[in-house]
Every structure is written in structure tokens, then in C-alpha cells.
Amino acid sequence: MRAAVITECGRPPVVVRREPPRPADGQLRVAVAAAPITPLDVLCGTGTSYFGAPAVPYVPGVQGVGRLDDGTPVWFSTTAGMRPGDGSMADYCVVPAADVVPLPEDVDHPLVAALGLSAVAAWMALTWRGELRPGEQVLVLGAGGVVGQVALQVARLHGARRVVAACRSAAAQERARRLGADAVVALGEDDDVASLAARLAEACDGPVDVVLDPLFGVPAAAALRTLTARGRLVNLGSSAGEQAPFDSATLRSRSLRILGYTNNELTSEQKAGALRTVADHAAAGRLVLDYTSTPLAEAAEAWTRQADGRATRRIVLTADGAPGRS
């Protein structure tokens, strides 16, 4: 079989030929149809993550979609790069049975691979952690990313009365409009809290009930000022800054809630349930995502694009003949 193998931390994987893996007790073998290259994969591959440097050589890929030996379509997760063992960027992968989630037969495999755990995060951060209720107004920061794109759609599916997006690039802003955002606010490198808060408030129809925040930093501090009494900001990232300059008065005056979210807190049942829900919506055409399909043979070039920050969409490695789109 073919496998993308990291032989040295900090360098892209090389596609080589290997013997197919054999499942041990409690494991299942998956013929991989699609495997996304995620930021976590690249971080682990550098050897600088908080999991420590992985033992090399290894096959990266913390999640993927494929079929079991009996033909059942499944999504699966791995601990590649975090613990010893190989991941999804190969023709075959073996994983614990508990980490496999059956999928609808007619689902688009690359699409579900692209959505994956990012979609789980968007879904659970809004509905479980943020307790989103029908009729509420939602502000999605970082709406150009995978989590943000999914969050715009999740808010709609859960009956939000108004959904406002905030993102940087013109392409991301146009995409947010296509995904159903009622208003879009441009984020800039030089934003200050007061002026950004004013722009966000102008785009919203009154106070906001829930903010989904994968950015933190200045955008989070500005978004806090838009919240209604007892409003919720759910943070699940810090790509705009590890610290946010908000003040005590803003929090106390409206009894606001700042909530942290991580997929790692979910039980196996919660994660599987959210993934199945995401897959069902994707199969029905209610959840979409811009992604790029790339053949497994071109894994090194695709990995480099992701690592260098040149990838504008989620990259999904696909087996020969797997359906997908560019």
C-alpha cells in the first residue's frame, strides 16, 4: 500500500510503499478514502507540540473517512503524532473499534473528512457549551475558518434569528454571505477594541446572545461588548492572540459568561453522536464546506502548503478514484 510517512520532524511526509497493517484484537482495518491535513497534524509533525516529539517514522493523520472490510462507510480518529502509531494518510489504517463511527451510505467521503472534528467543535460549542436556543442572535468570529464556516450553518439549523460573521479576507467575507450570514464584518490587523465593537454592534440587530470565538485577542474583547445580559462567549482558539484586553466592568455589568471549549472534554458517545449528526446534515445537503481534494501521491506538496499558510481551504488527501472537488 501507499503511505505518507514522516521520517524527520519538521519535514513534509514522503509517500512510500509499505505492507498493509493488520488489525489487532479490538481494532478494525479501514480502507481510507479521504484524510484531511489539519493544523494539529502539522503541529505534531514539527515535533514541537505539547505531546512531545513523535517517534519517527510514522504515518500522520488524526482522522479520516473510508470503508471497513465489510464495506461499511465510517469516519475514524487516530492519535498519530500524539502517541505511538500510524494515522490516516495511507491506503489502509487500523484503529480501535471505539474510534470508528458508521456513516450514511450516500455521504460524500471527502466532505465528511473535511468537516470532521472541526465540525464537531462548531456543533458542540454552540449547542452544548453555548446552549444556543431558537430565536437567539449569534456572532461568529473567524468565520473564514472551517469551524467558523460550519458554525454559521449550525446557528441557522438551530433556529438563530440572525447570524453575523466576522472574518478577514474578502474571499472569506463573500463565502460567509453565501453560507447565510445576515451581515459580515471585516476584521483588520490594526483593529482596536472600541472601534471593532462599534462595527460589530452596527451589524447586529440589538444585543448578541452567543459569540463563537476561535480567535480571542482583540476580536474577543470587542465581541464581549455586544453581548446581552447573561450572554455567552464560547472560546475554542487563540489565533488572534493568547490574551484579550477586556475589563471587569464589561463582565460584571451584564453578568456575562466566558466559556472554554475543547473536543477533548467530550465523551466518546458525545463525539460519535455529534459526528453522526454532522454527517447526516452533510448527506442531506444542509452542511457544506469549501475544501480542496488532492491525491495521496501529492501529500508532500499539500502538506507544505498547509504548513506554510498558503492553503486557503481545508486540504483533503484522497485515494485514487475517491469523489471530491477542488
Image (spheres, rainbow, N blue to C red):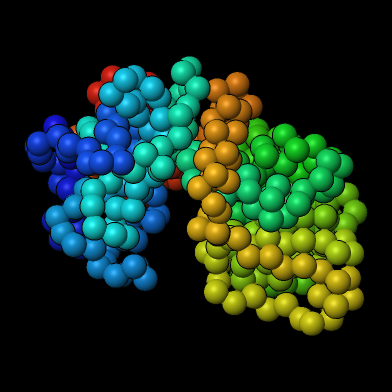
Q: Indicate left or right for 289 with 16 as reference.
A: right
Q: Residue at x 19, y 58 (%)?
A: 11
Q: Indicate left or right for 234 with 238 as reference.
A: right
Q: Where is 63 relative to 238, above or below?
A: above
Q: Find the residue positioned furthest to the bottom.
A: 248
Q: Residue at x 31, y 47 (%)?
A: 61
x and y percent of residue 270 in the render?
58, 46
- Which quarter of the picture shows residue 283? top right
x and y percent of residue 106 in the render?
48, 17
Question: The N terminus is located in which quarter?
Answer: top left
Q: Residue at x 59, y 77 (%)?
A: 243
Closer to us: 117 or 210: 117
x and y percent of residue 154 in the render?
67, 39
Q: Is residue 47 visible?
A: yes
Q: Where is 50 relative to 206, above or below?
A: below
Question: The C terminus is located in which quarter?
Answer: top left
Q: Find the residue positioned furthest to the front.
A: 25
Q: Is residue 110 visible?
A: no
